[in-house]
Amino acid sequence: MTVSVDVWLRGTEHATTKTIETIPREPSEWTDDDVRLVLEGMLRVMAQLKQPGQEPRTIALRALSWIVNAYEDGGVVIAIEITLGAAIAGPFDIDKARLEAMITRVMAPPVASVSTRVH
């Protein structure tokens, strides 16, 4: 599926629309992995606009603000903000609460493994 992303970079006066082409399923069938691809794709688009021609070194889902909002013509959008700027992707035909729960899981810090070894 193709996802439309509107990006505004700090220090600019206009937004740019790009697309993410790597999402394998439609929103109604999304898994946490698909949501991760959308969020990482949004960050990748922002990085590519900031530094054209360069592939981002690392895409990490840390230190970003996100929200899922209803879209005026139906569906929902994902909005993220980082120090680089802001991006909005969508609209998506998916339940808002379901998408919020998936993003919450994807954004959760990894759980440290617990050793069962007794010292």
Image (cartoon, grey):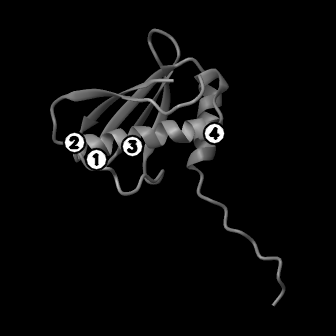
- Rendered residue at 30%/32% (across/down): 7
The amino acid type found where label 3 is placed reads Leu
Please tell me which of labels 1 and 3 falls first in the chain.
Answer: 3
Rendered position, 6 above or below 62: above
Q: Which residue is mark 2?
A: 10
The amino acid type found where label 4 is placed reads Asp
The image quadrant of residue 58 is: bottom left
The image quadrant of residue 86 is: top left
Q: Position of residue 72 (x, y in %)?
A: 44, 12
Dot 3: what SS?
helix
Dot 4: what SS?
helix
The crowding category of the residue bearing disc 4, from other C-alpha atoms within 10 Å (few below 14, some 14 to 19, many at least 20), is some
- Rendered residue at 65%/35% (across/down): 31
The amino acid type found where label 2 is placed reads Arg
Q: Which residue is mark 4?
A: 32
Report if the CB atoms under discs 1 and 2 are less than 8 Å apart: yes
Q: Position of residue 40 (x, y in %)?
A: 46, 43
Q: Which residue is mark 3?
A: 43
